[in-house]
Amino acid sequence: MDFAVKGEVLLKANELAEELKKGKKLKFSELIYTNQGDCHALGQPPITFLRQVLAVCVYPQLFNNSRIPGDVKRRAKTILSGCLGSSMGSYTDSQGIFAIRKHIADYITKRDDGIESKPENIFITDGASPIVRLVLSLFCHEVGGKPSGVLIPIPNYPLYSASLTQLGLYPAGYYLDEEKNWGLNIKQLKKHLEESKCYCTPRAIVVINPGNPTGQVLTRKNIEDVIKFASREKLVIFADEVYQENIYDTDSEFHSFKKVKHEMGPPYNEVELISFISVSKGYTGECGLRGGCAELDCIDKEVQAMAVKSASVLLCSNTVGQAALSVLCKPPEEGDESYEEFIREKCCILNGLANKATLVADKINKIDGLKVNPVQGALYAFVKIDMPENAIKGALKKKLSPDGLYAFELLEETGIVTVPGSGFGQKPGSFHFRTTILPPFEKMEVFMNKLKKFQSDFMKKYK
Amino acid sequence: MDFAVKGEVLLKANELAEELKKGKKLKFSELIYTNQGDCHALGQPPITFLRQVLAVCVYPQLFNNSRIPGDVKRRAKTILSGCLGSSMGSYTDSQGIFAIRKHIADYITKRDDGIESKPENIFITDGASPIVRLVLSLFCHEVGGKPSGVLIPIPNYPLYSASLTQLGLYPAGYYLDEEKNWGLNIKQLKKHLEESKCYCTPRAIVVINPGNPTGQVLTRKNIEDVIKFASREKLVIFADEVYQENIYDTDSEFHSFKKVKHEMGPPYNEVELISFISVSKGYTGECGLRGGCAELDCIDKEVQAMAVKSASVLLCSNTVGQAALSVLCKPPEEGDESYEEFIREKCCILNGLANKATLVADKINKIDGLKVNPVQGALYAFVKIDMPENAIKGALKKKLSPDGLYAFELLEETGIVTVPGSGFGQKPGSFHFRTTILPPFEKMEVFMNKLKKFQSDFMKKYK
C-alpha cells in the first residue's frame, strides 16, 4: 500500500526545505509545491461568506456583530437550528445534519435539471475520502469464491488503489486513452474486465471526471458509453465528481453521471451509482475543513442500510465541514447581502485557474520532449516525458523508476515538487509527472521557465 | 455488526418525537435523551475561550476585533502559523499540525509528571473513533494461521466490538467484575485469553478507563496488574482514556497507563501502548467538532510506519478539531486574559457532572430491583436490573432481549431514552441499561422519579 501524493519526493522536498531554512545554499532559493491539490496552501483565498458563516456557527456571540452581513446570520441560524442544543459541538445524524443534506440534494436537483435528489440518499463525511473508503468497504466480501473487483482507471488518484489494497479488494486497472484526451475506450474496458475475471468478481467501476491526475472532462457520449457498459456488466458506478466546479475549457461541459443516466431512460436509469462532492476542490478549496459527501442513487436497499450502519459507528462527520458543504451547495443568491462579493471572489478564483490551465498546456507543449493534453478541468496536468534510454538505464542503477529519477532530479535542480506518474499508474513504457495548476500565476511562469531549462539539461545529460 | 448507541431504541424514540411534534398525545410530553455522551445536545455550554479561538482561526478578520481577548488571538496566531498559507483550509501533516501535536505532547508530559511525550508519536484524527479503527486495522493480518484477536472488556463501548467485526479481527471478550466495582480480574483475564487461543492469536487488550459504559475509575494497583499481564502475554495495550478529565469521586484518581508503566520500570516500561484523548468528552464536550488523537508509546517501528502510511491516505483530520485539541491540551494559564472565565466555566461543568454522578447512584440504589456501582468518572451509569422471570418470558415472546424489553417499555411509558445492556455485552443472565449523567440537574431529578415509578409498575406487571 503506497500513497504517492505523500511519497518519497515530498519527503525529500521537506528535507530540502529544512536545509534552506537553516541557510544551506541550494540550486534554488525556494520550493515550488505542485504535488497536491492544496489550494489555500498555495495562496488561494477563502470565500468570505463561507468563513463568516463558520465563524458565527462556532461563536454565536457574533450574531450581535453588526459588521456580519444578514445572509451570513440567516445561514448560521439555519445550520444551528439543525444541531441538537443549537451547538456545533453536538453529534449530528450519522449521515449529516438533515437541513444541510437538503441543501446538497437541492443543489444536485438543480444541477441535473430537476432530476430529484433526496436528503435520505446523501452521506456527509470528513472530506470525500472516508465515504469513498466506506462505500468500497461494502464490497469487501467474496463472491463466487473470488474477491470482489473494482475497475479503476490508470492513471488514477491513489486513494483508490491504496484503499482497495487495504480492504483486500482486487484493483482491476483499465487504461485511459492518452491519445484520445484520456477518454475511456469501451472495447479496452471490456477486455480488462474479462481479464480481471481470472482473479476477481468485478462489482464496480471508478470513473474520475473531471480527471485526476489527467485533467480531462469527459464528453457526454463517453459517459453514455460507460453507463451502457456498467448496465450490461451489472457494475456499480463510482463517479468521483469532486472537480465538477473546475471546468476551464470553454468547449467542455460537466455532465453528471446521474443526469446522463436518468436522461437515457430504462434500463440505464436503474444503474447503481455513487457520486462524490467535496468542499476541498471547486472554487472553495477548503481541504483542511474536511467536508465531503456521496449521493447513493438506485443502490440496493440492503447495501444502503449497511452504509448507514457503517457511518453510525464513527458517529458523525465534523460539523464545520458540514457547514462548509451547506455554503458550497447553497451560495448567496442575487439580492442577498453577500452576493456581489461572493460572485467576485468565485470568478476571480476560477478565472485565475483557467488562465493557469491554458498557460501550463501551452508552455509545456512547447518544451522539447514533454507533451500534455489540454487541461480542461480539475487542478492537474499529467505530463508525458519522452524518456531517453540512458535515463531509463540510469534509473535502474539507482533503483528508481525512470519517472521517479526525473521527479527527483527536477526537485534537486529547481525546487519544483511534482509526483512521478508511476504513483498514479501509467501504460508500461510511458512516463509522466503530475503537476497542479495551483501556484500563483507569476510563480507558474517561473515554474515553466525552470522546467524548460531542466528538461533541456536532462536530455543532454542522458543523451 | 451492530451499534447499540444508535440502535433500535433511539429509532423508536425518534418516531415518538415526531409524533409529539405532530401533536399526538403520549404518556409523556417530552423525551429525555440519555442514550449518548452528547454533552452539548443536553445543554452543556461550550468553553468560551475554545470557541473564540476557533472563530478567529476560521475568520482571521476577527484579529481586528477589540472584544476578542489577547490570549485568544495569540493562540489563533500560533495555530495559523502551523497551517500552510496560514489557512485552516490547507491540508495539514497527516498526523496533524506539528505545533498542536506539541501542545498535546506537553500536556501528556505534564500529566505524567515529566515522563516524556513526543509530537512524532501523536496521531490526530477526526475524533478518537477513526484512530481507534486505524490502529485496530494494523492488526488485521493472520498470525499462525489464525486471525489476530483483541481482548475487549464486557461490557464495552460498541465501537470496539463493531470495528473488530468489520475488520475481520476476533473479539475476545473478558468480563469486568461488577461485584468489584467493574475492576479487571487478572485470573479471569488469563482464562479468557487461553480460551480465545482456539480461535485467534491474541495480540492486544483494550481497557477503557474511566469506564464506558461502567463509570468506574481503575485503581493504580489494577492498572499495574494489567500491565504485568500484557507484558507476560506480549499484548499491546489500547488504553481508551478519553474520559481522563471526568473524575468525580474524591477518593479516585486518574492514573494514565503510560505513567504507571514507565514508573514500574523494566521490563514493563517497554510494553507497547496506544492511548486515546478526545475533545468530545472531558469538560469541553465538543463531540461535533471531531477532534481526537492517539499517542503511540514503544510501538514497533514498522507498525508505526504503517500507521503513518494509513493516516496519509485519508490526507489529514479536520483543522478545527485539531485547534480544539490545542485548547484542551493547553488551556489559558494564570495571568492570561481568559484564565478566570475559563476556570469558572470548567469548574461549573465538572461540578455539575459530579453532582449528577452522585445523584444518579444515590437515587437508583434506593429503587427496588435496580443496582448501580458508584459513578466515579466518565459520563455513564450501567444499571443492573433484577429482571423478573415473567419479563424474561415476555421478552422471548416479543423476540426481544429482556433488557431490550425493559428499555422499550421505559421509553414508551416515560419518554426516557436509554441503551439496553446487551448493546455493550454483559454476563449471561444479568441485565442492565446504560444512562448518561448529562441531562440538566432538574431533569435528572424528574428522570429519577419517573424511573422509580416505572420500575415499580414493571415489577408489578411481570410479577
Image (tube, coloured by chain):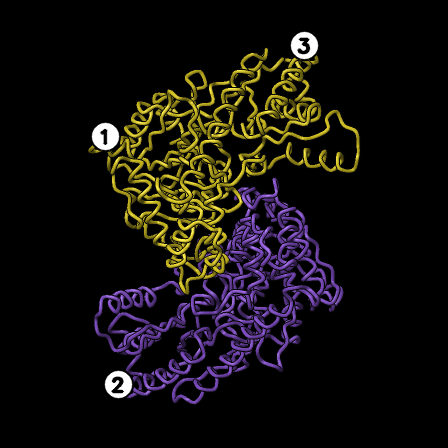
Chain colours: A yellow, B purple
> In the image, is A310 to the left or to the right of A366?
left
Q: Nearer the viewer, residue A204 or B286?
A: B286
Residue positioned 78% across, 37% down in the render: A22
- Co-location on one chain, circles 3 and 1: yes
Percent of width and height locating residue A35? 58, 32
Q: Pointer 1: what residue?
A: A264
Distance of mark 3 from mark 1, alpha carbons? 53 Å
Near mark 2 (Cα within 10 A), the count class, few <14, some 14-19 or many ≥20, is: few
Residue B461: assigned label: 2
Percent of width and height locating residue A98? 34, 54
Name the quadrant containing residue B86. Answer: top right
Residue positioned 59% across, 48% down in the render: B307
Q: Quadrant of the C terminus of chain B?
A: bottom left
Residue positioned 60% across, 56% down in the render: B66
Q: Quadrant of the N terminus of chain B?
A: bottom left
Residue positioned 37% across, 44% down in the render: A336
Query: The disc numbered 1 marks a residue on which chain?
Result: A
Q: Earlier in the sequence, mark 3 or mark 1?
A: 1
Near mark 3 (Cα within 10 A), the count class, few <14, some 14-19 or many ≥20, is: few
* Amino acid type of the residue that numbered disc 2 sits on in the rendered structure: Lys
Query: The disc numbered 3 marks a residue on which chain?
Result: A
* Amino acid type of the residue that numbered disc 1 sits on in the rendered structure: Met
Query: The disc numbered 2 marks a residue on which chain?
Result: B
